Image: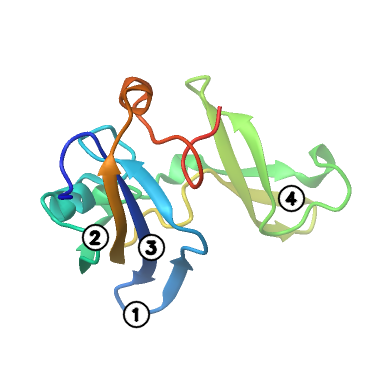
Amino acid sequence: MKIDKDTAVTLRYKISEVSGKLLEESKDPMVYLHGGYGNTFAKIEEALQGQETGFQTTLTLEPLDAFGLRDESLVQTIPKTQFPPGVKVGGQLEGRGEDGQTQVFTVTKIKGPVVLLDGNHPMAGKALRFAVTVMDVRAASEEEIAHKHVHGEHGHHH
């Protein structure tokens, strides 16, 4: 079956910096609903359109086509006293952005009495190389299309 709108596509992927440094590799396959539902990056969907199981490609995505540009307004310095004991670099916590939306912040540095938090995605601002392999393609169910995402193993769970 060819990848087209309303197909469920199972992928394995590797994300690297353009220098070749591996940043992330899928342990489990990723499954997404193809067809402009926002379940993967548009440039990846574009490259996979019309392809079949076994197809492999490597794409370089600029920051605006991947995790976006860094937004320095999402970097904050908070007094360490506002955190529970044991706060560690790399830890994540949820907060509310200025727009009221839930925002995930990563502790990037602890310097004396202050903690530096970054609300940017860790890969924001980077050009990235995505190596993808199509493991499976199937027709999406009516429920998956209505919900705009894949259900079941490696997909979305309700």
Residue 105 quadrant: top right
**Separation (CA) of disc 1 from disc 3:** 18 Å
Ranked by sequence position, the earlier of labels 1 and 4 is 1
Report helix, strand or loop for mark 2. loop
Q: Above or below — where is 61 with respect to 71? A: below
In this view, which residue lies farthest toward the right? 85
Q: Nearer the viewer, residue 115 or 125?
A: 125
Q: Nearer the viewer, residue 142 or 77?
A: 142
Image coordinates for residue 81, horizontal then vertical, percent:
84, 41
Camera-near label (1 vs 3) is 3
Q: Which residue is mark 1?
A: 20
Q: Which residue is mark 3?
A: 12
**In the rendered view, how is the structure colored?**
rainbow
Q: Which residue is mark 2?
A: 53
For badge 1, the amino acid type reads Gly
* The C terminus, quarter of image: top right
Query: Which residue is drawn at the image coordinates 46% and 49% (left, top)?
Result: 121
Q: Which residue is mark 4?
A: 114
Q: Above or below — where is 102 with respect to 44? A: above
Query: Which residue is drawn at the image coordinates 42% and 52% (left, top)?
Result: 30
